Amino acid sequence: MASHLGGEVVAAGNYDDIINDSLSLTGKYLSGDFKIEPPKSVRKWNRSLKIEGARQHNLKDITAEFPLNVLCVVSGVSGSGKTTLVKQILYPALKKIKGEIADKIGFHKAITGDVDSIAQIEMVDQNPIGKSSRSNPVTYIKAYDDIRDLFAKQPLSKMRGFQPKHFSFNVDGGRCDTCKGEGEQIVEMQFLADVHLTCEVCGGKKFKEEVLEVKYKEKSIYDILELSVDEAIEFFKEEKNIVKAIQPLSDVGLGYVKLGQSSDTLSGGEAQRVKLASFLGKGKNADKILFIFDEPTTGLHFHDIKKLLASFNALIEQGHSIIVVEHNTDVIRCADWVIELGPEAGDGGGTIVYAGTPAGLKKVKESRTAVFL
Ligand SMILES: Nc1ncnc2c1ncn2[C@@H]1O[C@H](COP(=O)(O)OP(=O)(O)OP(=O)(O)O)[C@@H](O)[C@H]1O
Ligand SMILES: [Mg+2]
Ligand SMILES: [Zn+2]
């Protein structure tokens, strides 16, 4: 369980205790009850991107082919050259081709292949999605606009002349003037961490009293922000556009997060999935994106890795492509295609040990990953 459903210590003890505790998700994974099931078959592909003649750092003049519209994992021991190949060559080189501002590009001869079949390239990390406590998952994925419109349409809003902007915490008008819609006041303490105090004017409700009096199905805008994503999907079921806008947050496994939870309090893995939800929300007809991840499972529990993999699949179903640099064997097993660099680190690495489906990797003697699959 996570967030407001979590926080209890569900199991403490030795391996057997954890396995036997039916509430512990870790136990379910250790005992094999919950497994990350690799897909029964791998996706086929016909489009790809190629980096030719990569020579940055330890890379030994290699040519790497990355299939598109699938989950492609780049594996290999630490120091084998994964980040150099993907983040220092492929990412900036493609950005430059697309006319975007790019960082320094690592040495290579050319990028070839179906460059035109992707419109955009995105690197997704676990960095926070916002520093202000005013930003939150619904504002990030732009679902809040429809909610504000709905509140502005209520009879009391009309009588009082409230517009959608009165239900925004980003501009003056409806938000609490004292805390500027943050719901709290931050007291800076010299030498100590800042102290967060609930705003005494609005009592943490972020809006002025006359705005909070506007209700939709008995709930104020503050009550709405207190709903979890899944509760909101149920609550707004007559408002199809709102449900459609919020649904991606549930699809990436964030159904338990409150709509109004400040972005700065989301965990790294949660922030990463909010970002993916914002892309999922654009739907099947959106521009095709190549997503790049460098070790996205760092710090994640098996259960969260499962959600991340489900989010990857949802993006691929919409026609996007995913390249993941990863050591995690569950992710490697779920890949459609694996490129392993190595065999060793530094000068002993920098070559392609294997490129193919995960099943084939098991048979490669030089692979340091194969034994763990
Ligand atoms: N800026 C740099 N200058 C010189 N050598 C570097 C630089 N960055 C990386 N290297 C070297 O290049 C090799 C490949 O590094 P890289 O970061 O690509 O490995 P990696 O496979 O991503 O490893 P990890 O799994 O630890 O992230 C390593 O030997 C590393 O020490
Ligand atoms: Mg790396
Ligand atoms: Zn206030």
Image: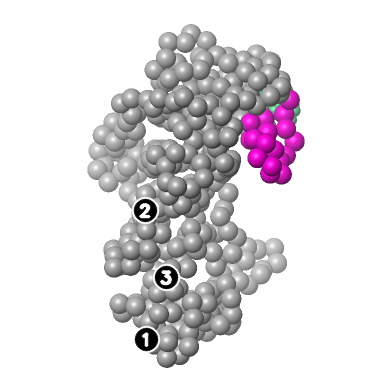
Specify the amino acid type for callout 2: Ser
Q: Which mark is residue 52?
A: none
Quickly name the residue at label 2: 250
Left or right: where 119 falls relative to 98 = left
Badge 2: residue crowd in 10 Å (few <14, some 14–19, many ≥20): some
Instruction: Specify the segment rendered in magenta.
Output: 89-107
Q: Nearer the viewer, residue 195 or 48?
A: 48
Q: Nearer the viewer, residue 279 or 250?
A: 279
Q: Nearer the viewer, residue 130 or 204?
A: 130
Structure colour scheme: one colour
> Which of the two discs, 3 and 1, labels the residue nearer the N terminus?
3
Badge 3: residue crowd in 10 Å (few <14, some 14–19, many ≥20): many
Quickly name the residue at label 3: 147
Q: Marks 2 and 1: CB-CB under 8 Å?
A: no
Task: Return the x and y of residue 339 as percentages of the image width and height.
Answer: 52, 21
Magenta includes 226?
no
